[in-house]
Structures are given as structure tokens and as C-alpha cells.
Image (tube, rainbow, N blue to C red):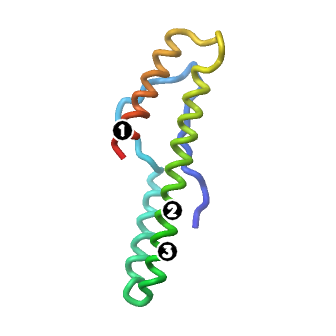
Amino acid sequence: MNEEKAAVATPPPQQIRPMDGPVALFAERDTTEFRKRWSDIQAAFVDEPRRSVEQADALVADLTKRLTDGFGNERTSLERQWDRGDNVTTEDLRLTLQRYRSFFDRLLTI
């Protein structure tokens, strides 16, 4: 199992751009791996139903943790963009607010 975290990369404050549209929650290879794991679990159900349910529970727990960690990291990154004392311009704040709006919309669409 690949233990890499699907981190949301955030550019340095001077390069912040508002998000134009929906952003995938995971990299494509991670999504493919999650779907493969689910397919394997489902295929094994006939022979080992209890084990399949246990593995499904573990997969959902892993996915939930990855989502929580990813969103937590993104929120922390957003906070760093504006919480720099007096070194923040109104333009930095405007762009950061747009990123918060995109982040907020992503949270509501899950």
C-alpha cells in the first residue's frame, strides 16, 4: 500500500492565484489505487465476507484520514498566507479570501 500523503500544494503568498474550478481531492494515481483496493475487496467478498467488510472499513478509515489531513493542511496553508502581521497587502488578503471561498465550496460539495 502506498503511504504517500496526498498533500495540497499551495504556492508562496506572492504567487497566490484564486482557484478557477473544482480541484480533485486526490491525485489520479491515488484515486486509481483506492478504486483498485475497493475492487479487490468487493471481489473477495464471496470467499471471505467478514474479511472483506473489515478491509472495507479499513479502506474507508484510510480515505477519511487522508481527506481530513489534506483539508487540515490546506486550511493551515491558507492561514499562513494572511497571518504574517503587517507584511500582508490588501491584494494578498483579497486573493487569500478567494482561496478561502474555493476551499469553502469544496468542503460543501463533498
Please tell me how crowded label 1 is: few (under 14), some (14-19), or many (20+) other residues with Cα within 10 Å: few
Please tell me how crowded label 3 is: few (under 14), some (14-19), or many (20+) other residues with Cα within 10 Å: some
Label 2 and label 3: CA atoms lie apart by 10 Å
Label 3 and label 1: CA atoms lie apart by 30 Å
Question: Position of 88 compared to 21: left or right?
Answer: right
Quadrant of the image occupied by residue 47: bottom left
First in sequence: mark 2 vs mark 1: 1
Q: Residue at x 58, y 32 (%)?
A: 77
First in sequence: mark 2 vs mark 3: 3
Where does residue 87 sit, x and y in percent of width and height?
Answer: 64, 11
Looking at the rendered image, the quarter that the N terminus falls into is bottom right
Mark carried by residue 61: 2
Where does residue 104 sit, x and y in percent of width and height?
Answer: 41, 33
Q: Residue at x 36, y 38 (%)?
A: 22
Nearer the observer, 97 or 10:
97
Discs 3/1, front: 3
Q: Amino acid at mark 3?
A: Gln
Mark carried by residue 55: 3
Badge 2 vs badge 3, beta-carbon distance below 8 Å: no
Q: Amino acid at mark 2?
A: Ala
Q: Which residue is mark 1?
A: 22
Q: Is residue 3 above or below residue 102?
A: below
Q: Is residue 14 above or below residue 7?
A: above
Badge 3 vs badge 1, beta-carbon distance below 8 Å: no
Badge 2 vs badge 1, beta-carbon distance below 8 Å: no
Residue that extends furthest to the bottom in the rendered view of this protein: 47
